[in-house]
Image (cartoon, rainbow, N blue to C red):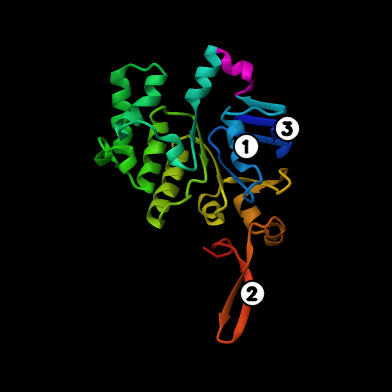
Amino acid sequence: MDEIISLKHVNYSYFGKIPALSDINLSIKKGEMFCIIGQNGSGKSTLLHILNGLIFPDSGETLFNGTPVTEKSMRDTNFGSQFRQKIGYIFQNPDVQLFCPTVFDELLFAPLQLNLPLETARERAEQTLLFLDIGYLKERPVYLLSGGEKKKVAIASILTMNPEVLLVDEPLANLDPKTQTFFTGLLLELNRAGKTIIFTTHHLDLVDHLQPRVAVLSEEHTLRKTGTASGILNDEEFLISMNLIHEHVHKHGEEVHKHYHSHYVFHKH
């Protein structure tokens, strides 16, 4: 597989004072399923923002298909428009992303911003509603949707662009179990269709289900380890050292038992 995104010695801090990422080096291949895990505050969302060109490193370099992603290159009409068309970002909180009056308006917005003809945009919106089985929401005001419905509409609004890369921040956040299952299956289906999927999560069971390549960020905002899902998840000592699994306390009668809680990671299939 060819490299689609790479980061070389990327550093980022907020206001020049609060460190968020330190000397990050990553290479992501076309068609990969790639996951970024780490404690809250380790820099996962910041890293996605850099990959999406929403912010730019203090130092180091981000490349997309071999071209540097900088404030200057993003102002270039050809590169900037191609980059925005090829990379889609699904925010953790869909309320940040959704702003149009109706669901159908949301799905039309991105294709029209890409200057697609109205009829083409409408066809894409209709096909996406069908693909996600949410046609019944078409004329619904966005503010009347449930949390799970908003999440589906948020991803639908990105899929109408037909991006090559999907960046997904905490895909299972604030979803009920049924909707979590839906999104897990959707990410697998999109990856099988050739999309490059890059997501953040603290749900180790999601990593177990999707079996992506994994990058682990430390509380010091460094990249501590990359590897296969099975290699990372079966290294219990490493997960404990990174505070990714925690001690669980429960009682049996008068006896108190303690063990490490790992969200299905060490279950055998």
Residue type at numbered disc 1: Leu
Tell me the residue that label 1 is attached to: 47
Residue sticking out furthest to the bottom: 254
Above or below: residue 158 compared with residue 136 = above
Tell me the residue that label 2 is attached to: 258
Query: Quick one: SS at disc 3?
Result: loop
Q: Which of marks 1 and 3 is nearer the N terminus?
A: 3
Tell me the residue that label 3 is attached to: 16
Spatial CA span between label 1 and label 3:
16 Å
Q: Within the magenta stretch, is there residue 67?
A: yes
Report the magenta residues as a range. 65-76
**Horizontally, is 172 left or right of 11 in the view?**
left
**Few, some or many residues within 10 Å of mark 1 (<14, 14–19, 20+):** many
User: The N terminus appears in which quarter of the rendering?
Assistant: top right
Spatial CA span between label 2 and label 3:
42 Å
Above or below: residue 81 compared with residue 262 = above
Callout 2–callout 3 Cβ contact below 8 Å: no
Instruction: Please identify the quarter of the rendering in which residue 221 is found.
Output: top right
Q: Earlier in the sequence, mark 2 or mark 1?
A: 1
Q: Estimate the x, y position of residue 263 in percent, counting from the top left.
A: 55, 62
**Horizontally, is 144 left or right of 73 in the view?**
left
Spatial CA span between label 2 and label 1:
35 Å
